[in-house]
Amino acid sequence: MSKQHRTTRRTFIASVGYAGAVLPLVSPRLVRAVSPSSKLNLASVGCAGKGWEDLISASGQGKLHNVVALCDIDHRKSGDQPGNLHPAQAKRPLGIGAAAEKFPDAARYADFRKLLDNAKDIDAVTVSTPDHMHATIALTAMSLGKHVYCQKPLVQTVHEARVMRKVAAEKKLTTQMGNQFHTSIGYRCLVKVIQSGAIGKVREAHAWTGSPSWPQGIDRPAGSDPIPEGVHWDLWLGVAHPRPYKKHVYHNFNWRGWKEFGTGALGDMGCHVMDPVTWALDLGQPTTIHADTDEPFAETYPKWSQVHYEFAPTPYTATEGLKLTWYDAGRKPPIELARTPKGYKLPGTGSMFIGEKGVLITSHAPTAPRLYPQEKFQDYSRTTLRDTFKSFAPEDHYRNWTDAIIAGKLAASNFDVAAPLAETVLLGTIAQRLPGQKLSYNSESMRFDGNAKADALLRREYRAGWQIPELS
């Protein structure tokens, strides 16, 4: 295997593709701290849904840190939600209303650009918008020296991931991606167990989710609906090409299935359940990717997919490297691979490692992993695994970020960690858009071998008037 494919988390990419060129990447060994005696001044861009949780958690209900500015394109006080929402999601506030009520002294905006024009006293920004706006908002904030917490999958394209990592390093900022299980005891324990060799060298891994819970595999509906009063539709579109407003089709929540706005089930959940795989095995970028999918649609991701990745070997994998398979829409790896007791069912969302000595399975929950065959690992699970799990102290993902800002340190899922994970996930979304094609990827040049269509999907077009220098 050529050296160009052996770039891992530990070997740190020395250069990145940036605006078509290869530029040096500055490692953020030191980050800018704020006064430890003061509270942070936080701004939130995207205050509804998951953004509400990000705002409340990062600020500690406003008790740990000040919330000084709020931005959301939806200024309605109330409104009906899409019918496909999970009950827990449906309970989340709609628009800026709840945040404005909770933090009445915070300045309110519909346009993030106006918020950042008045950002002199802002220390840090949470970005919790649809995927297509993440990079533009986060990079604008970072260009002004603001620390950033950005929801997964961090960005929408591989190029954006590279630029986000580069700018965070150059500006010496404390950043965090919103894959909150990265700081969980369960994932930290899993990494230690795998790297200790408990199941031996790993030859294959599997990651799966029950998502999507939103529509995918559909065509764009005809016509338009009246834009609700208080919804700034053109600001919601942002960098995307104009299209008519359609109720419950894009805003809110259902944008995830649309290629122009989201990254599908893989983008939404991959940074959660593929995280322990890339982390524990110290993987670089995949050398090949190919996808099997349901019928392809021009504008939406498929109803279901299986995405197959191949990676160069690391100290924790088999000598021939690693094969990783992604499943969504409720599909899972064959239960026979798990070597579990009869009647065992794989969790609805999770990851599985298949090693020389056994199998490790984890669910999308802050719990200890499980090792199989059960009879072989019974003593290990009762002693070493239990003690390893107990050796880790609980850690809040948001506090990990805000405490790191104050201390001038790197957060756990900083963009030097998060951007490579996002790149791996996003390469899979490119394969989904070119089903049946085996894509060979060169991570150093950020190019696919002999596939211009795949290369074109490494970047996106930005609507006139919405371009920023960092992504030009």
Image (spheres, rainbow, N blue to C red):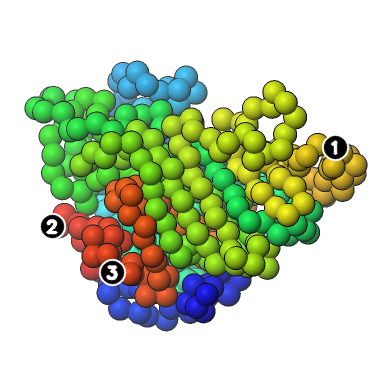
| Mark 1 in CB contact with mark 3 (< 8 angstroms) | no
Name the element at disc 1.
helix
> Which numbered circle lies on residue 450?
3
Q: Amino acid at mark 1?
A: Glu
Q: How many marks?
A: 3
Residue 210 lies, in percent from the top left, at 49, 31
Quarter where residue 158 is shown: bottom left
> Which numbered circle lies on residue 464?
2
Q: Amino acid at mark 3?
A: Gly
Q: Is residue 170 visible?
A: yes
Q: Residues within 10 Å of mark 3 (few under 14, many from 20)?
A: few
Name the element at disc 3.
loop
Quarter where residue 448 is shown: bottom left
On the image, numbered disc 1 is attached to which residue? Answer: 375
Residue at position x 63%, y 56% in the image: 203
Which of disc 3 and disc 1 is earlier in sequence?
A: 1
Name the element at disc 2.
loop
Q: Amino acid at mark 2?
A: Ala
Residue 129 lies, in percent from the top left, at 35, 43
Residue at position x 72%, y 26% in the image: 342
Tell me if 1 is positioned left or right of 230 in this view: right
- Which marked residue is nearer to the observer: mark 1 or mark 2? 1
Q: Residues within 10 Å of mark 2 (few under 14, many from 20)?
A: few
Q: Is residue 399 visible?
A: no
